[in-house]
Image (cartoon, rainbow, N blue to C red):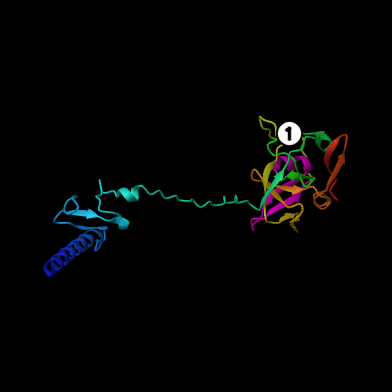
């Protein structure tokens, strides 16, 4: 009876040790790749197999874990707000007016002019070109300090037409002019920039607002009429 009991105890102990060794061989002590050697091929998978994530013994076909490949990971892409466009603070939207413009009581083809009179803040701007100077009796050039100096002259010549474009300006679409950030001289006197009506540059030409201040300094008379439009005339030099 004692022998039978001892024999049963010995068998149970052997089974326990066998199971323990198998468990250790197949579940614990995995290497950095998540697997370990099984030289006796107890798993039937060869001399090396994996236990990735605590799963049962398995192989990596083509180097891919079947358990990890079945897991889907959702990557949430962070939305980034679109960058606001960089706006040049010196840009001013101007319009070539559709109403009639007269210079010394003669209508000019302003819609086709290469350097037209334009409107900004409801004020008409005068381009300081050589041609406009011939019409209105002024001459603009750069002084030694690279400042634009406008000098009044007695010479008036309205016989030569202003330079024209092949295509008319669209009075309903704004054009881009640029604030010059500099002052000008009229008859060697500095005329300071006005915040509401700054000096502007368009197609490389400086434009000045025909406000009462500027018009007076240039000996010009400006008028507006709802029926006849805008006119600018040269006054006799005082």
Question: Circle 1 — which element?
Answer: helix
Of all residues shown, which one is farthest toward the bottom? 2
Q: Is residue 85 left or right of residue 65?
A: right
The residue at the point 68 percent across, 46 percent down is 177
Q: Which residues are magenta?
A: 129-153
Residue 160 in view, yes or no: no
Q: Nearer the viewer, residue 212 or 162?
A: 212
Quadrant of the rendered image containing residue 186: bottom right
Query: How many numbered dots are placed on residues in this image?
Result: 1
x and y, in percent, of residue 121 in the image: 78, 47
x and y, in percent, of residue 86 in the image: 60, 51
The residue at the point 60 percent across, 51 percent down is 84
Of all residues shown, which one is farthest toward the left? 3
Of all residues shown, which one is farthest toward the top? 166
x and y, in percent, of residue 112 in the image: 71, 32
Quadrant containing the N terminus in the rendered view: bottom left
Residue 37 in view, yes or no: yes
Q: Is residue 82 left or right of residue 169?
A: left
Badge 1 crowding class, 10 Å Cα cut-off, few under 14, some 14 to 19, many 20 or more, is: many
The stretch drawn in magenta includes residue 116: no
Is 171 rendered above or below residue 195? Answer: above
Q: Is residue 153 left or right of residue 49?
A: right
The residue that mark 1 highlights is 111
The stretch drawn in magenta includes residue 130: yes
x and y, in percent, of residue 191 in the image: 75, 57
Q: Nearer the viewer, residue 194 or 80?
A: 80
Q: Is residue 32 left or right of residue 149?
A: left
Is 24 rendered above or below residue 177? Answer: below
């Amino acid at each position: 009876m004692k022998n039978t009991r001892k024999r049963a105890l010995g068998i149970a102990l052997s089974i326990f040790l066998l199971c323990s060794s198998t468990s250790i061989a197949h579940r614990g002590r995995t290497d950095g790749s998540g697997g370990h050697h099984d030289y006796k091929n107890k798993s039937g998978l060869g001399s090396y197999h994996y236990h990735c994530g605590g799963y049962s013994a398995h192989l990596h076909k083509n180097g891919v874990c079947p358990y990890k490949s079945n897991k889907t990971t959702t990557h949430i892409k962070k939305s980034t707000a679109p960058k606001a466009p960089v706006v040049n603070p010196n840009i001013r939207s101007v319009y070539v007016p559709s109403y009639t413009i007269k210079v010394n009581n003669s209508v000019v083809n302003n819609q086709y002019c290469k350097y037209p009179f334009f409107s900004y803040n409801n004020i008409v701007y005068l381009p300081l070109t050589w041609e406009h100077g011939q019409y209105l009796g002024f001459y603009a050039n750069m002084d030694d300090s690279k400042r634009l100096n406008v000098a009044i002259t007695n010479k008036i010549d309205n016989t030569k037409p202003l330079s024209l474009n092949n295509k008319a300006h669209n009075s309903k679409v704004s054009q881009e002019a640029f604030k010059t950030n500099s002052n000008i001289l009229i008859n060697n006197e500095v005329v300071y920039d006005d915040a509401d009506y700054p000096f502007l540059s368009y197609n490389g030409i400086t434009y000045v607002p025909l406000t009462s201040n500027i018009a007076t300094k240039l000996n010009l008379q400006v008028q507006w009429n709802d029926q006849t439009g805008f006119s600018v005339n040269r006054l006799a030099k005082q």
